[in-house]
Image (cartoon, rainbow, N blue to C red):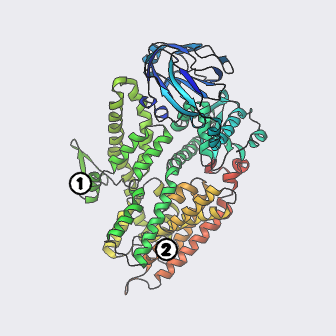
Amino acid sequence: MNKKIKLLAPTAGEVINLSDVSDPVFAQKTLGEGFALKPSSGEIVSPVSGQVVMVAETKHAIGFKTAEGMEVLIHLGIDTVELDGKPFTISVKANDQVEAGQSLGKMDLDAISAAGKENTVIVAVTNTATILADIELKKGQVSAGDCAAVVTLKEANQATKNSKESKYQTTAKAIVDAVGGADNVKSVIHCFTRLRFTLKDDSIPNDDEVSQISGVLDVARANNQYQVVIGQTVDDVYDEVIKLLGPDFAVQEQTGTVDNSDAKQNLSFGGKIKNAFFQLIGVITGSMMPVIGLLAASGMLKGILNILTNFCHMSTNSPTYTIINAMGDAAFYFLPLIVGFTAAQKLGSNPVIVAIIGGFLIYPDLVKIYASGKFSYFLAGVGINANFFGIPIHIPQYTYSIFPMIFAAWMAAKIEPWIKKWMPVTLRQIFTPLVEIFLVGMTVLIIVGPVISFISEGIATVLQWLLTVNTALSGLIIGAFYQVLVIFGLHWAVIPIIANDIASTGHSVLNGIVSVTMIAQGAGALAVWFKTKHNPELKGLSLSAAISAAVGITEPAMYGVNLKYGRVFITSSIGAAIGGLVNGLLKVDMYGFTGSLIGFPSFVAKAGQGNPNNLLNFWIASIVTIIAAFLLTYFFGYQEGDATSPKQAPKKKNLANL
């Protein structure tokens, strides 16, 4: 028989399901199974017998470990970390032994309500995956110390099946202990391969000892962070670290409230601008990383479709083409919705709400307004194509875009706490999403989108002017900076120019230069693949990203590899500039939309039109681009230490260390 343990109610009140809690971290059981309690009393007692392993500095959270190895967290209120411990009086400390039902202190329910916070108490078993077989709640009214739930523990042989989780737990515990425990941690975030701690006293960790921990590849100190390199399992170790430290550390990471004020004060104005830019790039890449594999797969699928249409005579009007094209294009068409979800996870807003805002922006009827091309008049160079309550507005193209959604996630993270301050608790479940969707959605639609559109139109005008001045110079400049426009979604005004060129003249020099930039980003990712020896995840990602770029999809290369290791993006862009220069000197023209290597049929000049050597010139420019971007990245843009040997990282000062 599996062992059963009672979880006592830490205070008097009504026991409810975790899924009914307003905080998504608990409601989605990210920190494990358990229950919540709507308190009617401020008395707090221990839910289990065992050792106190953690008392939060702000007193709102207490962690326990029982003799059976069960780890239990009490969280007093929602978002009460912001109250700096004022409503709480806690009488125990770390390492104290307590008995089930023993008094732990008190919480001031009135003070919590007056501060606009929820007083819901949460009890979670944070090592649910390794120890818990079942949990049975006793919902309803209880007194402090009454049985609120009965948990069934796994048998020993069942627990061993979760050796993978136990391995990550062991690594996480050793790391947290080595950096000085929870009391020494301000915040922790993670990137592609590293845990990044901001510590109160960074002299406590011993680098040699930390690097010897099982599961740790190496350590580094850079940018006021203590960086622990884990490799491809960093997500799993990070999750265990957060279970040990508590959810508020995860919220700090997501909302960007990492306390590095001292460092910021020491930065010059230029340094602050640079730091803000790197933080923005970090948010963009962090928001894109969860979907990079999906985009790479979709890109390769579209490449296969191009092969079928160009060489196997598949009709673009056939149902087969339509089905495969929809399958390959869905991830890109719905990118605002997907990125809205991932950006919200990173920035601390509600992922579902921000995803809905993304869905609103690409709603078919709104897309039709832009696609119709009907403008009532132009205001500051931007075509007015709609009105909202009589106010003239411009609705731009949002499909495929990411930057407006990152702004939406940021804004949602800022206004949600403000909404909660004045919204009555009984109305929050319905009216908080309503207000948030309306305010954020309309801000993006009416202000942010048109501003980006206005900037895009200006850039498009400059590009058109450059092409009339000198094709070699325009190839150099556009090649160097076009993919920067893609990062911020500013390239959309260029696409109508290309479409108009092809529709009216049958060709587009500009599209040929854009094609070069795709090839260059792929060549940079290919150099990373070629040079990486000890990081199988990065090696696999960089190869698939290079292939995807070769078929015209650069997002996996840019967001998954090149921007992640900042100099790679720079060297790839320099390679694109060199290729663009050659492209301009040879006056390479393009007769179709499909670019990059897979699009070479688009460079075949039509009979009697254009340069008969145009296809040859395309291959010359492409090969020069590949060689330039590959060699620049191989020798100057990337060292494997950027990903796996961070002791060199502080000297390199690349984006991965920021």
Q: Note whether residue 448 is visible.
A: yes
The residue pinned by badge 2 equals 584
**Residue nearest the observer in this picture, 308 or 542:** 308
Pinpoint residue 408: horizontal percent, then vertical percent.
Answer: 41, 42
Q: Which residue is drawn at the image coordinates 44% and 48% (left, top)?
A: 339
Q: Which residue is drawn at the image coordinates 51% and 64% (left, top)?
A: 548
Q: Quadrant of the C terminus?
A: top right
Disc 1: CA contacts within 10 A as few (<14), some (14-19) or many (>=20): few
- Determine whether, in the image, residue 297 is placed left or right of residue 464: right
- Determine whether, in the image, residue 53 is placed left or right of residue 332: right
Q: Residue furthest front?
A: 1
Amino acid at the residue labelled 2:
Gly
Q: Which residue is drawn at the image coordinates 52% and 32% (left, top)?
A: 134
Pinpoint residue 449: horizontal percent, then vertical percent.
Answer: 36, 48
Amino acid at the residue labelled 1:
Tyr
The residue pinned by badge 1 equals 377
Q: What's the CA distance linking mark 1 and mark 2?
A: 36 Å
Pinpoint residue 434: horizontal percent, then vertical percent.
Answer: 32, 35
Disc 2: CA contacts within 10 A as few (<14), some (14-19) or many (>=20): many
